[in-house]
Amino acid sequence: MKSAKQYLEEANKLVTRISTEDAIAAHKAGNGTFVDVRDSSDIAKSGTIAGAVRVPRGFLEFAADPDMQFHNPALQKDANLYLVCGAGGQAALAGRTLQDMGYTSVTNVGGFGDWKEAGGPVED
């Protein structure tokens, strides 16, 4: 059996995490698709990264699978995907799931609070 801590440790080893500053630079350069994996109620309270695709972690597999009726066309297996959540844990776990599904460029941006505090562009 694996614990939540073990899942998170494995995800953090396999999914690259970049600094908030590097993530903001990638966003400004238009270098990929930003995905907020938090629940809609969390996003409603704080906002999200400007232009981010909103896919709750609990729905990720359905949105990421092109054979599912719920596939989100913004999620392409060869796209640069930058994942954000509340603190970085859900983004890491979501990134690991996407890697398992064949996504080749998945990056953990960390927490939205850090993004906002660093002056990254936001929207409601």
Image: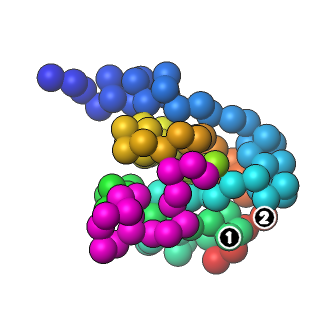
Secondary structure beneath dot 1 equals: loop
Checking the image for residue 121, the label placed there is 2
In the picture provided, is 33 more to the left or to the right than 116?
left
The residue drawn where x is 29% and y is 31% is: 4
The image shows residue 15, relative to residue 80, as above or below, that is above
Tell me which segment is drawn in magenta: 63-79
The image shows residue 21, relative to residue 51, as above or below, that is above
Which label sits in the foreground, 1 or 2?
1
Please state which amino acid type lies under the numbered disc 2: Pro
Q: CA distance from mark 1 to mark 2?
A: 9 Å
Return the x and y of residue 7 as percentages of the image width and height: 33, 29
Q: Which quadrant of the figure has residue 53?
A: bottom right
The residue drawn where x is 48% and y is 44% is: 103
CB under 8 Å between discs 1 and 2:
yes
Q: Main secondary structure of the magenta part?
A: loop
Q: Earlier in the sequence, mark 1 or mark 2?
A: 1
**How is the rendered protein coloured?**
rainbow
> Dot 2: few (<14), some (14–19), or many (≥20) neighbours within 10 Å?
some
Secondary structure beneath dot 2 equals: loop
Return the x and y of residue 10 as percentages of the image width and height: 40, 24
The residue to which callout 1 is attached is 51
Q: Is residue 74 visible?
A: yes
